[in-house]
Amino acid sequence: MSDKNFIILNDPGKPKMTHQLIIAGNWKMNLLRDGSRKLISDLQKGYTFGSAMKVILIPPATLLGSIADQIRNSPFFLGAQNCHEERFGAFTGEVSAEMLADLGCTYVVLGHSERRTLFGETNNQIRARASSALDFGLTAIICVGESIEQRQAGLAMDTVSKQLEECVGSEANSNNCIIAYEPIWAIGTGKTAELQDIEEMHRHIRNVLIAKSATGNDIPILYGGSVKAENASNIFAVPQVGGALVGGASLNSQDFLEIIKAGQRND
């Protein structure tokens, strides 16, 4: 499924190893308190990798407070699945970046394709939310990715370029921003992009980031899209892949630990 319009602007090769490999588990709208406590307890018992990787747990908002307490003094970090761009106000049902930071979050996912397609979030909104996240010390995990129709039409690179240009602000750097490439057609479908496609898109994203920022070569780029224990090792070996945004497999402690182990082997 390679995009034939892809042009290599430069060849940055492997990213500078200024960051640990990042593995983030997006729980989406799953789990209640009992299930959450058990999952984290199992992860804590099985985690033997020290500081070799950065593992981020991204539960639904209802669980953030209890998880912050449970993972205190552990190797895990806490992230949220979204935030509003305003600090406070009459926005029923929304949560601000400041509120997330107050709960103990250090990361927030923004622009996930499910938010874009199901809730109509725009690039401008995502950029405003990222700016708010940065104001309150959160690292923004900004998601980009194309639909199957866009890829088949040869528009994958252009689509992702536009998302990066409009969602990633000039204040973004290697300390406050992570990019997650998630081809929409591979999310929750069991389909994974070909390794060549992953490499081409990650290299393209790297080129765009380098053009935007003096630290663009250091901003981590994660791959997401049906990442599983069986394919994680091959994905982590792809140039420019700095980790993974994991969906369904992060809800099973054994599967998630196997993905983390695969990252250790490719560190």
Image (cartoon, rainbow, N blue to C red):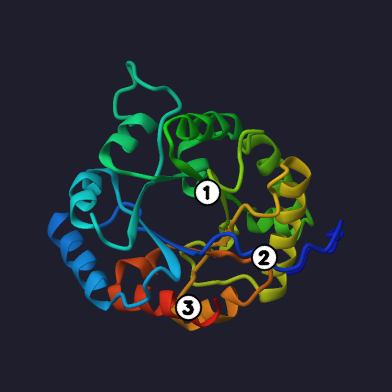
* Of residues 116 and 164, the one drawn nearer to the viewer in this rendering: 164
Quick one: quadrant of the N terminus?
Answer: bottom right
Crowd around label 3: few <14 · some 14–19 · many ≥20 (10 Å) = some
Indicate the position of residue 153 as horizontal and vertical percent values.
77, 56
The crowding category of the residue bearing disc 1, from other C-alpha atoms within 10 Å (few below 14, some 14 to 19, many at least 20), is many
Front tag of 3 and 1: 3
Horizontally, residue 30 falls left or right of residue 52, namely: left
Disc 3 marks which amino acid? Gln
Give coordinates of residue 189: x percent, y percent.
Answer: 49, 67
Q: Position of residue 147 (x, y in %)?
A: 63, 54
Q: Earlier in the sequence, mark 2 or mark 1?
A: 1
The mark closer to the camera, 2 or 1, is 2
Asked if residue 122 lies left or right of residue 249, the reply is right
- Residue that lies at the very extreme toward the left in this rendered image: 34
Quote the CA–CA distance across marks 3 and 1: 28 Å
> Which of the 4 quarters of the picture holds residue 99?
top left
Q: Which structural element holds mark 1? A: helix
Q: CA distance from mark 2 to mark 3?
A: 16 Å
What residue is drawn where x is 52% and y is 48%?
Answer: 113
Check disc 2 and give the amino acid type: Gln
Residue linked to disc 3:
264
- Residue 72: which quarter of the image? bottom left
